[in-house]
Image (cartoon, helix red, strand yellow):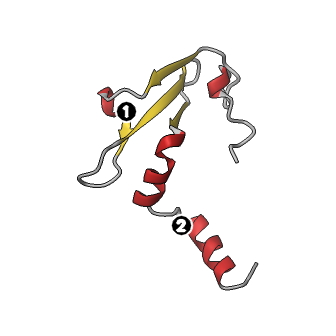
Amino acid sequence: MIAANTEMKSGSCPKCGGNDIRLQHRGWGHRNFLPSTFWGKAIRLDNYACVTCGFVESYVEPGDFDRLANSWAIAPEKRSVMSARVDGAF
C-alpha cells in the first residue's frame, strides 16, 4: 500500500537520492502532531527530512490508524472512487 519510492525510513530520499536523512520521532514539540478531534488526543508523527533537498515525509504510527480514519475526512479523489464503487460503477 505504501508507494514503492517511499525510502526515507531506510535512509534514502525518493526526490533527490540523498542519504543524509534526519528523524524527529513522535515528539510533542514543534507541532509534530495532527489534530484528531477538538477535544481528542492528538496523533503524533514521525518526521523524516532530507538535509540535501529539504523533502519531508511524515508517518502516523500503526496504532493510531483507526483514530485518524475516524476523525479525518476522506480525500476528495478517493471519495469519488469509493462512491462509484458503491453505486456499482466498478
Considering only vertical position in the picture, is 38 above or below 41? below
Q: Nearer the viewer, residue 65 or 46?
A: 65
Q: Quadrant of residue 7?
A: top right
Q: Residue furthest top?
A: 20
Quadrant assignment for the C terminus: bottom right
Q: Nearer the viewer, residue 71 or 16?
A: 71
Residue at 45% over, 22% down:
24
Neighbours of disc 2 within 10 Å: few (<14), some (14-19), many (20+): few
Left or right, 26 with reference to 56: left
Q: Position of residue 62 (x, y in %)?
A: 54, 41
Neighbours of disc 1 within 10 Å: few (<14), some (14-19), many (20+): some
Q: Position of residue 66 (x, y in %)?
A: 48, 53
Q: Which mark is residue 76?
A: 2
Considering only vertical position in the picture, is 9 above or below 4? above
Q: Amino acid at mark 2?
A: Pro
Left or right, 53 with reference to 10: left
Q: Amino acid at mark 1?
A: Asn
Instruction: Tally the marks.
Output: 2
Q: Nearer the viewer, mark 1 or mark 2?
A: 1
Disc nearer the start of the sequence (1/2): 1
Q: Which mark is residue 9?
A: none
Q: Position of residue 20 (x, y in %)?
A: 60, 14
Residue that badge 1 annotates: 32
Left or right, 15 with reference to 23: right
Q: Secondary structure at mark 2?
A: helix
Q: Residue furthest front?
A: 63
Give me the C-alpha separation between circle 1 and circle 2: 25 Å
Considering only vertical position in the picture, is 3 above or below 75? above
Q: Quadrant of residue 21?
A: top right
Residue at 31% over, 55% down:
37
